[in-house]
Image (cartoon, rainbow, N blue to C red):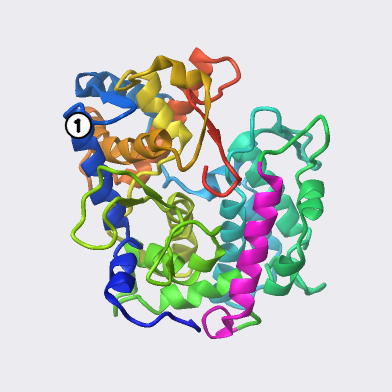
Amino acid sequence: MTDQPPLSPETDAARSLLHAAAVRERSHQILEHGLAGKLQHFTVDLGRLEACADAVVTTIREAYPSLEIPFHARWRHFSAGGHDRWDAVMHSATWSDAEQMARAAFDLAIVSVLLDAGAGPQWRYEEGRTGDVFARSEGLAVASFDMFVSGIFSSRADDPFRVDADVLVGLTAEDLGEGFQVSGSNPLVGLEGRAALLNRLGRTVATNPDIFGQHDDPRPGGLFDVIAATADDDGRIKATAILDALLTYLGPIWPGRIKLGGIDLGDTWHHPLVEAHDATKGLIPFHKLSQWLSYSLIEPLEWAGFSVIEIDGLTGLPEYRNGGLFLDSGVLALKDPGEAARPHPVDSTLVVEWRALTVALLDRIAEPIRRALGLEAQDFPLAKVLEGGTWATGRRLAKERRGDSSPPLTIISDGTVF
């Protein structure tokens, strides 16, 4: 990639945060502080973790009685309403080889995941071909899928199933609003932020053809070739290699937040209790959308003939369904219950604590869930715990406690975090 900053101790320290291991280690630091009663906003009651795990197991057994659970990935949402939309594309496209197919799948997954921040409680999407109406993540997935297959992201009339950098650069909030059926009575949270994120994606891809255009015009799906090159002689790719590539090459797309040693740290935030022996003291990364995207790129790599290994190297996702699971089940509690009635910015200490505790508690809850199901970690990685799983149980509990399925905390987001 061009214009890399010069090496320095700060640069090296910053790069150490661009890995899932840093997310996990620092999130567990926050959990230990929570167990010691030292957090500003939350208490932690691990005595309630077993009952929380039981609630997840109930969800899993109802949704997947055979326990054949797919990975937590955007592809599940593309099948909302029981329609396998991607399979229809696979049978209608004229790709010449598996690599072309994989680049198209990468294109779709990358754009759709980047658009998958919280939609807000009012927004809905009506699918023209079925008449089905979807909200939240499923609605965003189906809407972005429809935009993809219509060719809105392609610069080639003869090849709609692609995303081109030059199109992303010129995409407006109005363009996205039309695709998402936004209106005065159907508002979508963070529309401007979503458009700006895709614009930055387009500029990053366009200005780095050596990365994104190795076998085609520059396109997000060109990252397939970069990740495929990390495979060993047996065609195995580590899941963390996917995240490392995303954080290395897509780092510039994130809004200007914290920069250290010339490195954009993306979804990284301040918390006063985070310890480190370098310039990253007080910083905690989450890389939520990048990890969600990493999970969502596993299947396209497997369709192209690779095997993805060490999936538990990635962490659970610190978003409001998983975080809501622990609040609604009583594993977490607000020290000041009145905080639940006030909206909180994403950089607030309260939200940072909530997200860190979510990551660490997902690690903790995985084992009792596996034990109840009689499964080992190698057969039931965290990606299946999430899908089975914690995310769905978080949504179920939200529906039971609040009829509109809203999360237990209100976050002020720009459409690029949650």
Bounds of the magenta segment? 190-215
Vertical side of 108 occupied by 330: above or below: above
Q: Amino acid at mark 1?
A: Arg
Q: Is residue 36 left or right of residue 340?
A: left
Q: Position of residue 106 (x, y in %)?
A: 56, 64
Residue 64 visible in the shown view:
no
Residue 46 place in picture, x, y as percent: 21, 24
Q: Horizontal placement of 137 versus 93: left or right? A: left
Above-or-below relation of 250 to 288: below
Q: Position of residue 353 (x, y in %)?
A: 35, 36
Question: 286 or 316: which is nearer to us?
Answer: 286
Horizontal side of 208 relative to 160 (left or right) equals left
Q: Quick check: can you spot residue 185?
A: yes
Residue ID at (71%, 33%)? 123
Magenta region, main secondary structure? helix
> In what element is the residue under mark 1?
helix
Instruction: Give coordinates of residue 199: x percent, y percent.
Output: 67, 64
Residue plotted at (66% across, 81% down): 217
Please say whether residue 211 is one of the residues in the magenta stretch: yes
Is 146 magenta? The answer is no
Above or below for 152 versus 401: below
Residue that carries the numbered disc 1 in the rendered image: 371
Residue 25 appears left or right of 200: left
